[in-house]
Image (cartoon, rainbow, N blue to C red):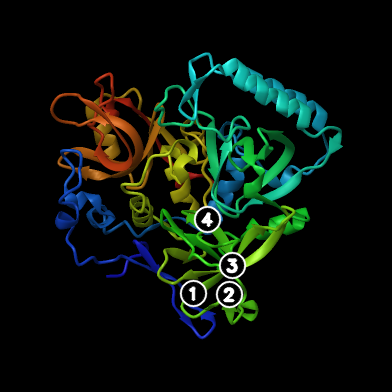
């Protein structure tokens, strides 16, 4: 059975030519009931509900309708960059000279001010946070750049995190804190970053700069320096309607281990990663010791011994979930992509190479070419229609939500989720969540730290339901011209 998006994308190659892509729903021989016989679910969630196909079939007459054209997505992205409350960064405009000494002083002071007032643990061991952050600030002040400078243009060579302070350590508020409190976001392979400062902290070189969604510190070893802005732009800028690049459409996969191509050996590629295709005329007969049959040849940035960017060719097997060009934005495709994460680990800010609630939204929508801001409050400000339902009671909220398009992001304070549909009067969502209590029985809150399917009748620690706390529905596809 063919669907626009499913667990695997089939990309056939005849000779050396790419055909149009078709994303296929995998019809497993094992039934959902058997596959989930030994897994836990919220009490009102059935095994069938744990497949995207179940929810898509409920809306089969409209699930395949295109919600946004490439031109509309392009317009949305432009307007999102211009919307102050989205807090997004136009990286292409960050090419002016700046005072690195002034920035150094500001960043050293920011590190000092970041020292928590709460008891702090570093790698599970309690520390004196004023001493720990003081040493970090001193390293920034003594090793950072000075004088008048221009930015460096770099690309991530592996999935990596962006930190609020230059620390590779795991910093938490208890010995078993599930969140690294200084992780703020992450970068996919090939994502751009603009560097405006550097400092060696604890013998590790960090860069400070800007991604599309946040500003912060990255580990320099995870980045490659492009020789020019033009080279940097050529790696990551694509035509929204183009077909000369591949997009990863599953939670993640790794490239094969290889002794002969160490730069790409076991490289992890995550949902939303965009990689330029190698033109037919430039595809080699072999990469390392592997021929190219039944593989897609892509360019991947890598570091040389001096940290400079070098262009590597890597092969992605046709059994991997990728799309040639961005995926058409339909309700069905939003759901199929969302379910690629089902059961994955929750990871604040992208820690553990995973997703938190807003990153799941970002990564799913990136597959269509649409850029979402970093956190929930910023996402509610995107171009489009945001409907405030905070003043409605639960009955009327449920009624409104029942009428919206599956795939719509829903928001409450500190959490976002993707609406799936309504069954037996209950609204269901999929989200990367921390904890909740089942919608039935005693309100016993349990940690999940996973991507799960739940009804909005699950409960928070204060006993209220998620439904009671939902305040906003966001329809990015309703942006004006």
Q: Are marks 2 and 4 in contact (CB under 8 Å)?
A: no
Left or right of 92, for residue 78: left
Mark 3 vs mark 1: which is more N-terminal?
3
Q: Quadrant of residue 463?
A: top left
Label placed on residue 402: none
Element type where label 3 sits in the image: loop
Q: CA distance from mark 4 to mark 1?
A: 17 Å
Tell me the crowding category of disc 4: few under 14, some 14 to 19, or many 20 or more residues within 10 angstroms, Cα based: many
Mark 2 vs mark 4: which is more N-terminal?
4
Q: Badge 3 is on which residue?
A: 261
Mark 2 vs mark 1: which is more N-terminal?
2
Mark 4 vs mark 3: which is more N-terminal?
3
Q: Nearer the viewer, residue 178 or 386?
A: 178
Farthest residue in the bottom direction? 15
Element type where label 2 sits in the image: strand
Q: Badge 4 is on which residue?
A: 273
Label placed on residue 287: 2
The spot of residue 181 in percent (x, y) is: 50, 28
Question: Where is 372 relative to 155, above or below?
Answer: above
Tell me the crowding category of disc 3: few under 14, some 14 to 19, or many 20 or more residues within 10 angstroms, Cα based: some
Q: Quadrant of residue 130?
A: top right
Q: CA distance from mark 3 to mark 2?
A: 8 Å
Marks 3 and 1: which is nearer the front? 3
Give me the residue at 70% from left, 56% from top. 233
Label placed on residue 295: 1
Q: Are marks 2 and 1 in contact (CB under 8 Å)?
A: no
Tell me the crowding category of disc 2: few under 14, some 14 to 19, or many 20 or more residues within 10 angstroms, Cα based: some
Q: CA distance from mark 4 to mark 3?
A: 20 Å
Mark 4 vs mark 1: which is more N-terminal?
4
């Amino acid at each position: 059975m063919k669907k626009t998006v499913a667990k695997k994308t089939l990309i056939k190659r005849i000779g050396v030519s790419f055909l149009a892509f078709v994303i296929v729903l995998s019809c497993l021989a094992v039934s959902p009931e058997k596959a989930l016989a030994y897994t836990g679910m919220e009490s009102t969630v059935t095994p069938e509900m744990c497949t995207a196909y179940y929810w898509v079939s409920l809306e089969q007459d409209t699930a395949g309708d295109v919600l946004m054209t490439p031109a509309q997505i392009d317009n949305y992205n432009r307007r999102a960059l211009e919307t102050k409350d989205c807090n997004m960064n136009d990286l292409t405009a960050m090419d002016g000279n700046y005072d690195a000494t002034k920035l150094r002083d500001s960043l050293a002071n920011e590190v000092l001010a970041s020292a928590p007032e709460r008891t702090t643990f570093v790698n599970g061991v309690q520390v004196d946070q004023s001493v720990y952050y003081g040493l970090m600030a001193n390293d920034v002040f003594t090793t950072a750049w000075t004088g008048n400078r221009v930015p460096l243009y770099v690309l991530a060579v592996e999935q990596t995190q962006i930190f609020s302070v230059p620390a590779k350590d795991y910093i938490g508020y208890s010995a078993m804190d599930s969140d690294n409190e200084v992780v703020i976001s992450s970068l996919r392979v090939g994502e751009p970053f603009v560097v405006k400062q550097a400092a060696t902290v604890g013998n590790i070189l960090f860069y400070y700069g800007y991604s599309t969604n946040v500003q912060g510190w990255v580990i320099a070893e995870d980045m490659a320096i492009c020789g020019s802005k033009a080279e940097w732009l050529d790696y990551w800028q694509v035509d929204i309607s183009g077909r000369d690049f591949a997009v990863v459409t599953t939670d993640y996969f790794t490239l094969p281990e290889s002794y002969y191509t160490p730069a790409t050996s076991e490289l992890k590629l995550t949902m939303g990663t965009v990689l330029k295709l190698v033109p037919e005329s430039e595809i080699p007969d072999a990469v390392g010791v592997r021929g190219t049959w039944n593989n897609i040849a892509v360019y991947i940035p890598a570091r040389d011994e001096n940290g400079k960017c070098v262009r590597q060719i890597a092969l992605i097997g046709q059994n991997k979930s990728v799309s040639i060009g961005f995926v058409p934005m339909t309700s069905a495709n939003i759901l199929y992509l969302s379910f690629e994460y089902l059961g994955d680990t929750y990871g604040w800010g992208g820690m553990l190479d995973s997703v938190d609630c807003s990153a799941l939204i970002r990564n799913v929508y990136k597959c269509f070419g649409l850029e979402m801001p970093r956190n929930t409050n910023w996402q509610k400000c995107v171009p489009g229609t945001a409907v405030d339902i905070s003043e409605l009671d639960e009955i009327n909220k449920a009624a409104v939500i029942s009428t919206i398009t599956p795939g719509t992001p829903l928001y409450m304070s500190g959490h976002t989720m993707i609406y799936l549909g309504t069954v037996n009067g209950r609204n269901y969502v999929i989200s990367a969540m921390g904890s909740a209590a089942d919608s039935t029985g005693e309100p016993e809150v349990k940690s999940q730290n996973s991507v799960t399917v739940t009804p909005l009748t699950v409960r928070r620690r204060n006993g209220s339901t998620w439904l009671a706390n939902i305040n906003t529905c966001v329809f990015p596809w309703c942006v004006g011209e």
